[in-house]
Image: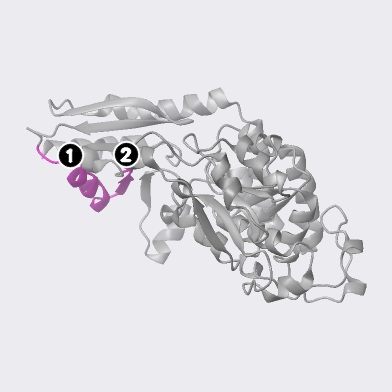
């Protein structure tokens, strides 16, 4: 069915062994999620009411006070930053991204800077970098320390941004301690930190004020979906800057668990997060996918990934200059292909290009191609894809 849809549009279907990359349309959606989205599309509901129910469910799954379905993790970063800047002041919400006279800085460790923090800057704040990443530059072993973050905090600091990952320094708990000492919230970018499912609770349990997750990656929700969870007043501020606000305060009755009208002196106009709106289909799809993700046995998920990679590994032709092995890559296994620097018929880049330009087009992770390595990720592979990949690899390596 999907092939017919894309065929009618003249778009090639690819075999995605790169992983859950947005530019390759993420992963594959379970039939139950697609069915829930189709069912949701057949009725109209009040979006604030639906987001209120989503908030309660997300709170239960994450341990947060409240939650919001967003149009991706980057949207969560924008909304979370905006909430930290404005609080519940509608006049400040109306002025963003003009932050004149507001808390207009977000402190971040220099080694955690990345292209996605543009979403933070979109709220009108400036990023204040701290620390020197000697361990990445090869100049030493040190990175930023908690005291450096503390020294950068001021009356202009709206939040501290902490990008989650196994190499993130300083530890989150230390960051939270110094930030909370000055009553400054900590916003965690945990976009790709699932699996394991325990990470849904880990950052909130540590004391983070806001956490953003991607919904279109490992969770298996709609590609343009995400989760922002955290303290209720901040989620309320984020929701007010995302929702359609073309309504009179007197006639608006949002669910109090999401938005407590008693705390508002008035309603803001459409907020800076309005371009990040989510539809009923995305909300229902994300909630369905998250429920399925949490119910899935992690061991069964791992076994399915291992089986897909093992099928590819078993079909690879023997070449003296090519080695292949299944290895862990964080919480997800990968098949690593290593091409010897001498004696090989082609290098890693050439092999990746040949795979991409063939039929079907096969995309792999070529981030380490300069070192002679390609990675095959199983998360977006469907049954039948390993056989297609084996046939293409055999043909390329034979020629």
**Displayed quadrant of residue 272:** bottom right
Q: Tell me the quarter of the image containing the C terminus.
A: top left
Q: Position of residue 29 (x, y in %)?
A: 54, 46
Task: Report, in whole angstroms, how far the alpha carbon at label 1 lies from the one at label 2.
Answer: 44 Å
N-term mark: 1 or 2:
2
Mark in the foreground, 1 or 2: 2
Residue bearing mark 2:
139
**Where does the image place residue 199, in percent across and percent down from the top left?**
61, 35
394 with respect to 16 (left or right) = left
Q: Which residue is mark 1?
A: 395
Mark 2 residue crowding within 10 angstroms, few (<14) / some (14–19) / many (20+)? few
Q: Secondary structure at mark 1?
A: helix
Few, some or many residues within 10 Å of mark 1 (<14, 14–19, 20+) = few
Q: Is residue 386 magenta?
A: no
In the picture provided, is 279 more to the left or to the right than 260? left
**The residue stretch that appears in magenta:** 345-365
Q: Residue at x 50, y 38 (%)?
A: 168
Label 2's element? Answer: loop
């Amino acid at each position: 069915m999907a092939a017919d849809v894309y065929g009618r549009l003249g778009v090639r279907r690819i075999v995605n062994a790169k992983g859950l990359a947005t530019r390759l349309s993420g992963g594959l959606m379970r039939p139950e999620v697609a069915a829930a989205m189709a069912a949701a599309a057949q009725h109209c509901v009040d979006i604030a009411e639906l987001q209120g129910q989503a908030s309660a469910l997300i709170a239960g799954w994450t341990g947060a006070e409240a939650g919001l379905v967003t149009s991706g993790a980057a949207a969560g970063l924008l909304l979370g930053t905006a909430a930290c800047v404005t609080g519940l002041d509608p006049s400040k919400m109306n002025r963003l991204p003009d932050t004149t006279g507001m808390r207009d800085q977000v402190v971040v460790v220099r080694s955690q800077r990345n292209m996605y923090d543009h979403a933070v800057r979109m709220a009108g704040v400036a990023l204040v970098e701290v620390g020197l990443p000697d361990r990445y530059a090869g100049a030493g072993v040190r990175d930023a320390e908690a005291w450096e973050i503390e020294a950068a905090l001021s009356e202009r600091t709206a939040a501290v941004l902490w990008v989650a990952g196994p190499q993130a320094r300083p530890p989150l708990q230390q960051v939270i301690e110094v930030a909370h000492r000055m009553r400054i919230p900590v916003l965690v970018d945990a976009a790709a930190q699932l699996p394991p499912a325990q990470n849904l609770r880990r950052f909130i349990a540590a004391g983070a004020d806001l956490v953003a997750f991607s919904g279109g990656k490992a969770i298996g929700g709609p590609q343009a979906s995400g989760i922002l969870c955290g303290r209720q007043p901040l989620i309320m501020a984020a929701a007010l800057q995302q929702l359609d606000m073309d309504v009179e305060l007197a006639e608006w009755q949002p669910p109090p668990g999401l938005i407590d009208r008693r705390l508002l002196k008035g309603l803001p106009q459409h907020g800076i997060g309005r371009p990040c709106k989510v539809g009923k289909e995305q909300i229902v799809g994300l909630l369905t996918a998250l429920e399925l993700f949490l119910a899935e046995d992690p061991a069964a998920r791992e076994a399915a990934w291992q089986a897909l990679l093992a099928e590819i590994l078993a079909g690879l032709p023997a070449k003296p200059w090519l080695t292949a092995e299944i290895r862990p890559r964080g919480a997800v296994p990968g098949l690593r292909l290593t091409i010897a620097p001498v004696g090989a018929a082609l290098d890693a880049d050439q092999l990746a290009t040949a795979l991409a330009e063939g039929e079907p087009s096969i995309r792999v992770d070529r981030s380490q191609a300069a070192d002679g390595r390609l990675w095959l990720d199983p998360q977006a592979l469907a049954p039948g894809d390993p056989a297609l990949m084996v046939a293409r690899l055999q043909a390329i390596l034979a020629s």
